[in-house]
Image (cartoon, rainbow, N blue to C red):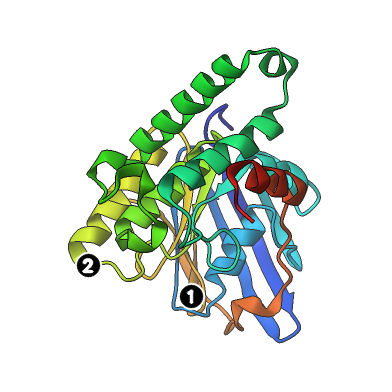
Amino acid sequence: MDSPHGAAVSAKGFGLQGPRGWAFRDVTFSAEPGSLIAVEGPSGSGRTCLLLALTGRMRPTEGEAATGGLALPRRAAAVRRIAALGPVPGVSELDPAFTVAEHLRERALLQRRYDGSLRALLRSPGERAAAARARIDASLDAAGLDPATLPKAERTAVRDLERLEALRLSVALALIGRPRLLAVDDADLKLSDAERAEAWELLRSVAGAGTTVLAVCSQAPEDAVAVRTGTARTDTTTGTTDPAEPAEPEESTHVETAHEEGAADAFAETGRA
């Protein structure tokens, strides 16, 4: 069963092969809407490729998968509309020179273009601004980021954020679009034990509110649906573990992206070149 909020995610014999070999192979699991899914494995084991494939941004080579009831890769474009990326190096990184306010304003402008309903278009400029601010505030609250606590509030540049603050900002930006699936790469990278616990609590709270969370990590928390790459994979429907073939570097496959034209328009409106 699927949910109007979270997206169920499943895979069976799922694999992706690039020019230099298999990024990941024989991935099988099933997760309900609103689950916390942790893709666990060593760096270079195909974790990011799996995340991108399940969000419709990489084309798999074999097997079956579905996100939100949408079969991959056939419905990849539809999956991209319901799955938002948090931080993914080389794909959805924060601009270190941009301020928190500029990132938030840019994302709100992008979202306004994608919403595009007649009712939204008929709103006055003041109503549109108030709606965008309300959506931003709700996303910041869900991500646990209070700009007032930052060194220069919303004028703080990304380069001046701590690692956990940057993660919270990336999650807030993704949640502005009210996705059914939130995907986060390197969720526990370069965090202390205490910060790692905070990061997982953040992702757990997002999942608890109904949005399915798919997070790449080095070590999955015990309460997550664990999907392992590189050394072994666990079939979460049976509990069995089978050996997996070695994976190649994750850069071996082209990444599909969307919304380039809308992004360019938003950059222009925020003054970003």
Please state the total of marks drawn on the protein image.
Answer: 2
Quarter occupied by the N terminus: top right
Q: CA distance from mark 2 to mark 1?
A: 26 Å
User: Disc 2 designates what residue?
Assistant: 192
Residue plotted at (47% across, 69% down): 241
Quarter occupied by the C terminus: bottom right
User: Disc 1 designates what residue?
Assistant: 232
Given the image, on which type of amino acid does mark 2 rest? Ser
Closer to us: 47 or 146: 146
Given the image, on which type of amino acid does mark 1 rest? Ala
Residue 89 position within the rendered picture, expressed as x and y whole percent measured from the top left:
53, 67
Locate residue 179 relative to residue 115 in the image: left or right.
Answer: left
Looking at the image, residue 24 lies above or below residue 84: below
Residue plotted at (37% across, 56% down): 166
Residue 104 position within the rendered picture, expressed as x and y whole percent measured from the top left:
49, 41
Label 2 or label 1, whichever comes before in sequence order: 2
Locate residue 11 relative to residue 220 in the image: left or right.
Answer: right
Locate residue 28 relative to residue 265 in the image: left or right.
Answer: left
Is any atom of residue 32 visible in this view?
no
